[in-house]
Image: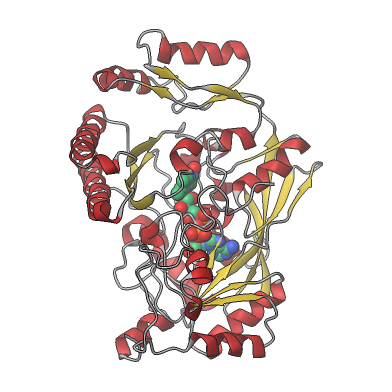
Amino acid sequence: MVSNFVDGFQGLRTEEGNENLKFRPSDKWPINTDKVRQGLKNAGFAGKVVARCDVPNEYSAAIYRWAENLQGLPALVVYPETEHQISITVKFAAENKFAISVRCGGHNGAPMAPETILVDMRHFNAVKVDEESRRLTFGGGCNWGEVYEVANPAGLEAVGGGYWGVGVGGWHTGGGYSWLSGKYGMGCDNVLAVRMCLADGSIVVASEVDNPDLFWSIRGGHGQLGVITEFTTQAYPNGGQALVGMLVYRPDQLSQVLDILNEPVVAIMPWIQGDDAYIAKIKSIFTDTIAPMVDRTYIAHDQVQVAHGADGMFAVPGAKRKVDGLTTIGDLWPEMALEAWQRWEEYTTNVPDCRGSVVLFECHSRDKMASKPSDATAWRARDPHYYAVCTGTSMTTATDRYAESFALETAELIGAHHLAKTGEPARQWGLGRMDPDTQEFTYSYATNRDRLKQVKEEYDPLGAFQSPLGQQTHSTLLAKSGKVN
Ligand SMILES: Cc1cc2nc3c(=O)[nH]c(=O)nc-3n(C[C@H](O)[C@H](O)[C@H](O)COP(=O)(O)OP(=O)(O)OC[C@H]3O[C@@H](n4cnc5c(N)ncnc54)[C@H](O)[C@@H]3O)c2cc1C
């Protein structure tokens, strides 16, 4: 079984005197989190609870995230094992004016005010397969590796994340790009139903039939309406082997590589699914005319193997990542990619400690994802597009600031190319910027924003769940009132 918290997740933030922990408890903090924990226990919560006063050991491990800048400082981290325990937590939060945030795979995050309760869903990791209807039902705390490990031996493929460690919760509610999206659409297009705990503590089903507005909203509207305890999704027969891994080219070969990538027939990224002859044919386009320096491709026989294909890049223990610039782009314009490359080269030459930083252009076949109208789900980006992710990575605290500025500036550069080419601002996408005050997501949601706001008002009128919609949470209101510092 693939665990949520291996490969760099466990224990990295647990040493005494950990330099990475920004927070130290002091008298200035207005909340006695041990008392809050006791209150939750008195309300009937029988599961494990880590409080901020447990800093540094247990607490620093509990708030650990794939990217350090997405790490929040909640008052409590709770580990429910049943829906009833989630319900108790949500009601307790409402009564005591705490905001709720949810953690699934920990590959994203949200700014958290001090009076937030973080619900860690790791115990909700059961996976069931209905082979006849080709449906998968899995817990709202699974990562994709856990789903693939059960689905693949049953002969099924999930429209899931490319990296095993990404959580199904943040991935689906954020739209969900899969290497199968070219064939089967966005991840959110393949959700059939969810079970979730709402702000009043009730457990409901959302599907096309039950609570359809809620169902529309959780498909791309991000996790702001409740705690999803279970997903049911459509799966497909195993597509067989795929070529994955990495082809590495010299910098001076970049424009030739881009020429090939812009040919419409080529599956981009080293995920080429098919029989040996098909794989060899497509691969030769990349290797015959422009020989790579290093060929690290290999045949993966199921999704589990594919999802570990990028471990060398994503599962490096000790790296401090500053994710930014998740942005949709109309095309892979050569001058944009070349400029991004030059930016990376200049920056990593100046700051070698940050060589792990990455500008990633993810290019799937675009038509299937764009085949639905933009109001079919809360996920609105239905114009044909690719996307770019800029991640600054630093190995020491001294270079943090460079990593952050690299991610931001490169994202801006890419966005400027998109604007110049299309006349439209690039759509920022991702959850790292869930700031209730900035309305950062306005453009991304565009015409779907009003409907999302209505659904939010109906299902979470007090804004208990952290929201990117400009609605203020308990925490923000308290912070503004000066009750917290
Ligand atoms: C290495 C890496 C690879 C990635 N690859 C892809 C990719 O191939 N395709 C793609 O589309 N994206 C990809 N992403 C982006 C990824 O989908 C988002 O970062 C996503 O939000 C991560 O989900 P998570 O559950 O791991 O994160 P978390 O930080 O655990 O959750 C993020 C947010 O999702 C919401 N949420 C999570 N679980 C629940 C739940 N059970 N109920 C309600 N709300 C919930 C909460 O609001 C939470 O704040 C990748 C990111 C990384 C870092």
Q: Is residue 250 above or below residue 66?
A: above
Image point 46% across, 31% down: which residue?
A: 365
Can residue 436 be seen from the camera position used here? yes
Q: Is residue 424 above or below residue 268?
A: below
Image-based side of 159 in relation to 320, left or right: right
Residue 470 on image: x %, y %: 35, 72
Residue 20 on image: x %, y %: 37, 62
The quarter of the rendered structure image containing the C terminus is bottom left
Residue 325 on image: x %, y %: 31, 49
Image-based side of 394 in relation to 229, left or right: left
Image point 47% across, 61% down: which residue?
A: 64
Q: Is residue 302 above or below residue 72?
A: above
Residue lying farthest to the top in this orientation: 288
Image-based side of 37 in relation to 24, left or right: right
Give residue 234's quadrant in the image.
top right
Image point 39% across, 77% down: which residue?
A: 113
Image point 65% across, 82% down: which residue?
A: 88
Q: Nearer the viewer, residue 435 or 189?
A: 435
Image-based side of 74 in relation to 48, left or right: left
Residue lying farthest to the right in this orientation: 132
Q: Is residue 482 above or below residue 83?
A: below
Residue 349 on image: x %, y %: 20, 35
Can residue 222 be seen from the camera position used here? no
Q: Nearer the viewer, residue 187 or 405?
A: 405
Give residue 105's quadrant in the image.
bottom right
